[in-house]
Amino acid sequence: MSNTFSIKVEGLDRLQKSLGDKAKTISNEIDAEIGFACDEAVGFMQTDAPADQGFLRNHISKEHVGRMNYNIVAQSDYAAYVEFGTRSKVQIPAGLEAVAASFKGRSNISAIDAKTAIFEWCARKGIDKELWYTIFISIMVKGIRPHPFFFRNFERVKKPLLDRIQKILTSEGF
């Protein structure tokens, strides 16, 4: 099973119950807004994710779980390590400690696989072969810097989404 992380918007079922007779119409509008915001976030995430071979970018997606219930998923074995960094270079934004902790030590990649991946990356980048092992050792000992692409883009669309939901509710007299 691959390591993945996702964002799930919760609590909207309570809102739907409180809307009464207008619930279906309003919840459809809100569902559409959430879907739009998720599409927008996925686009931003894909743009910001590193694109050496495009695997990470191509495995960021939205899934519609149910009415007003979406997941955004980065389904790659290394997505969390790119997001937060590794070893001594880890940087975890406030509020994401539990998410980051859930990935600590959960790599499906062996040192041999990492070496092969790093050597192949060096070859693609045209780096002199004599430097490959030094780069591998540096990454394995010091780690990689974080390259945030996921959570910051969720935050980027959250406020405009909440504003649009508020506008829908206000136009309906709530």
Image (cartoon, rainbow, N blue to C red):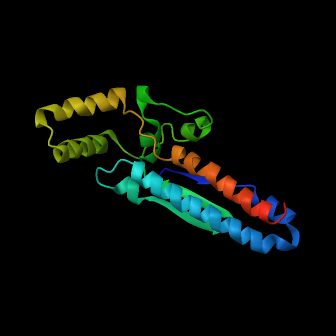
Tell me residue 152's x, y (percent). Answer: 53, 43
Which residue is at the front of the view, 36 or 4? 36
Tell me residue 45's x, y (percent). Answer: 46, 52
Task: Kindly identify the residue that appears in the image at 83 percent across and 72 percent down.
Answer: 22
Q: Residue furthest front?
A: 171
Tell me residue 156's x, y (percent). Answer: 55, 47
| Res 95 quadrant in image | top right
In the displayed structure, 34 sits above or below 148; it is: below
Task: Kindly identify the residue that appears in the image at 64 percent across and 55 percent down.
Answer: 161
Tell me residue 62's x, y (percent). Answer: 53, 62
Residue 1 in sight in this render: no
Count of number-bearing discs: 0
Which residue is at the front of the view, 46 or 172? 172
| Res 66 quadrant in image | bottom right
Task: Kindly identify the residue that appears in the image at 27 percent across and 29 percent down.
Answer: 137
Residue 27 in sight in this render: yes
In the displayed structure, 141 sits above or below 162; it is: above
User: The C terminus is located in which quarter?
Assistant: bottom right
| Res 27 quadrant in image | bottom right
In the displayed structure, 83 sits above or below 71; it is: above
Residue 38 shown left or right of residue 10 in the figure: left
Which residue is at the front of the view, 67 or 131? 67
Residue 88 shown left or right of residue 162 in the figure: left
